[in-house]
Amino acid sequence: MVDLSRRNLLHAAAAASLLPGAAHAVEPDSATIGWPSDVTSWDPNLRFTPDAQAIFKAVFDQPLDQDPKLKLVPNLITKWEMAADARSLALEFRDDVTFHDGSKFTAADFRWTFIERTKAGQKLDVAQSMRKLTDIEVLSPTKAVMRFDSPAPTVPVWLAFLGSFVVPKAYMEKVGPEEFAKKPIGTGPYKLVEHQMNARIVLERNDAYWGPKPALKRITIEIIKDPSARVAAVQSGQVDITTAVPVREIARLGAMANLSAELNPVTKVILLQVRNDEGFADQNVRLACHHAIDKVALSKAFYGGAAVPVSVLGVPGSPGYLEDYTLPFNPDLSKQLLVKSGWSVDKPVKIRMATTNGQFPSDYDIARAIVAMWKKVGIEAELEVIEYAKYFELNRGGKLPEATLYTFDNATGDPEIYTGYLLNPKLPFSPWKDMTFGQKVIDQFNVADEKARVAGWRALNREAAEMGACMPLLQSIQTVVRKKALKVTTYGNGWVLPQAMSWG
Amino acid sequence: MILLATLCRRLVSAVPILFVVSILLFIALRILPVDPAAMSMPPNATREEIEAARRSMGLDRPLPEQYAIWLGRALHGDFGRSIQLRRDAGPLVAETLPATIELAAAAMLVASILGVAGGLLLFALRGSTAEMVAETGTTLMMSVPEFLWALLFIFVFGVALQAMPFTGRLDPGMQRPVITGFLLLDALLVRRPDIWWSALVHLVLPAIALGLAFAPPIMRVLRASLLDVYHDDYIRQAHLRGISETRILLRHALKNAILPTLTLMGVQFGFLFGGSLLVEVIYSYPGMGNLMVDAVRNADLPIIQLVGLTYCVVVLVINSLVDGLYLVLNPKLRAR
């Protein structure tokens, strides 16, 4: 029986009066975000989900953080010192941090998050990033030492990367990981109020937050997977900000009086992953392929010219990137290289190429354009479409074709996570299986000295480009459309953080 | 009593169908060229770790043995764990099912109202020029797929007119009451007319988008049935008795003509249930279709399997109910 009390009638009347613009009302201390994907689990250590990183960062804290220019900065950890041999990392923590239930954060929570959970048999992706970790010695509530079985110079970077979010030991032990995922608590600037799978996440400001208080009290994240629906939602005002809208919509939306539309370069790289055998056993053919790709034209055609052409694995401004090195677009050189190996336009070399369709903006169109560019110089590529999920499986079975259009996100910008992952024959990212070069990549993981480490990766980047071991194409871009009055900090890795939003 | 017996008979006969469907689904999913073990591990997992995961998931065993294990567990309510979400598949599907049923029922209501009204209109216009126009209209309605209607409505009613919400099930700021999962019902149970109204308004566009394509077949079948019925003696006699045309149509002819339409509606509900996939994604509607799309994208086999089975169960149950309804409305069948 419906209660028709005056209060409920007023509720209904209020709802009805808001009907045309029910979601349009802008409260000064709240915002609605249109987000393209959902959080798979609220256990932040469980799975590496790059798209959920920004949402996790609202609820949980990472031991270290990155500033908008991606520099590593203190967070829960105030000081960190890597030993000269990179086999231990001394840490000091803040003393004024509490979880959302009011319990105090200590080094024991850090130890629980990164080693005890794994030792207890919980299958967590974070264990993969902490493979070398053997122990965390807790010296006091605010001091700890991480110990590794081999040099682990990038652990500080990983402490600000995927899966590295501190969870409360006492609460999790009490309720168990399954219940924790239903009612998660962290130390972050927002508390989770509601999550309806594939629909909505509601966050409310944590007024006891140790750091800068977020300007917005309430954040509603609408999960809108369809790009056209996201465009419609921001255009109609049903959300205040959204990301990952089609590039072609940016100019139109940007021209609207109340909207601001941006194309921001991010740490994601678009590249061709290549094999070192079959049609690509010949270095001349590989380099001919690379020189035949007009990256500027690709950027103009598919990303409005905003995607920066790159020649090595990395993005401008990242430590491993070579600002002074370019592998130029030179179709004549391509033809010459092919002639050296006995190929020509009349007698083209035949290779296979794979691409995803819809995994990232314009992927299939880019692949088709590359095939057309190759044809002009004497390379005939047979294009096949694969599901992104099959990339690793095909690679493990040695079934990827000579070239595969691929995208790789590395929010940290660290060269190990670009070159070390993309060209390590032992990891499933790389179809390049030649151990002569591969061993150099593997050895580079163990270089402890920071300067030597970065220099080593830069040298390997150049060598890889010169031998055609990979073909970096473009620095990817992120599209953001927001109401002009909503201010948001732009991060170099594409984070759109609720705590960095305010109404101007 | 006859009705109950018929329903029971139908439901019992559904069991072997369900069993066969489960085998077909199981085989189809296992021969897909995807590796669920690899999908369950982070990208930087080693080959050895993936092999260990494969063993722990039982994927190294022969297919019949894998099926027997799955069936044994399924009979105890354990449908496996989602590879992507790492949660039990059963509760996940149960969580999303009410939203899809609510959407499909609303869409069926739209299709039925439009279908019956349109069928009556088509019949009334028979032989006129307007009939041709109306026929063209129904062809157009059928030709446009539901996802296109969905996008069209968003741009017309959401963006251009800004008259209707088109994301999720509720306005931001409203918290969903969780009792049965059927939001319209839950809002009434917690005595919140504002939530009920918001849920209803959010249901309008997806329900119309989904239901629109299913209305024309109902119109056509009803029109054809009415044409048949109008040749019967009792209609002729009703005319001779001077009963008004409207009364003959609504009180006498429609009652008999609706029976084949009812069967069609039952069949359509199954299609409509399956057709909700894209509409749910476009409208950010948190139903089973949305879950299924993600599962397919991530090769989440336990979820795909359970959602597939659930579709099958829903279709079987609806068919049984329609058979029962047919029995209630058709005295000839009861007499047999």
Image (cartoon, rainbow, N blue to C red):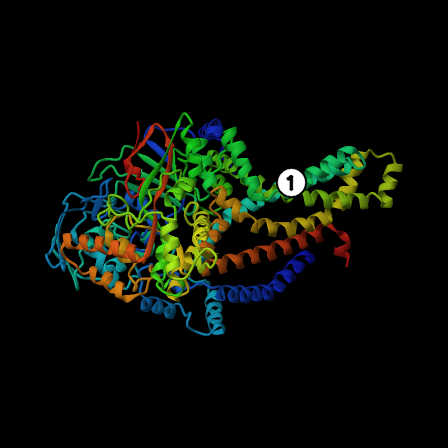
Q: Is residue A130 left or right of residue B262?
A: left
Residue A432 location, x and y as percent?
Answer: 33, 62
Q: Nearer the viewer, residue A55 or A227?
A: A227
Considering the image in quadrants, where does the C terminus of chain A appear? top left
Q: State the image coordinates of residue A266 (x, y, percent, origin top left).
A: 31, 43
Please tell me which residue is depicted at 80% across the width and 43% down the height of the picture: B227
Q: Chain of mark 1?
A: B
Q: Quadrant of residue A84?
A: bottom left
Q: Nearer the viewer, residue B301 or A480?
A: A480
* Residue B206 higher or lower than B288, as above or below: above
Q: Amino acid at mark 1?
A: Met
Residue closer to the observer: B162 or B155: B155
Can I make out residue B204 in this image? no
Residue at left offset 53%, top offset 63%: B25
Name the residue furthest right: B240
Describe residue A82's horizontal placement relative to residue B109 as left or right.
left
In this picture, is A425 found above or below B179?
A: below
Name the image quarter holding residue A172.
bottom left
**Which residue is disc 1 drawn over?**
B141
Q: What secondary structure is found at the residue carrying circle 1?
A: helix
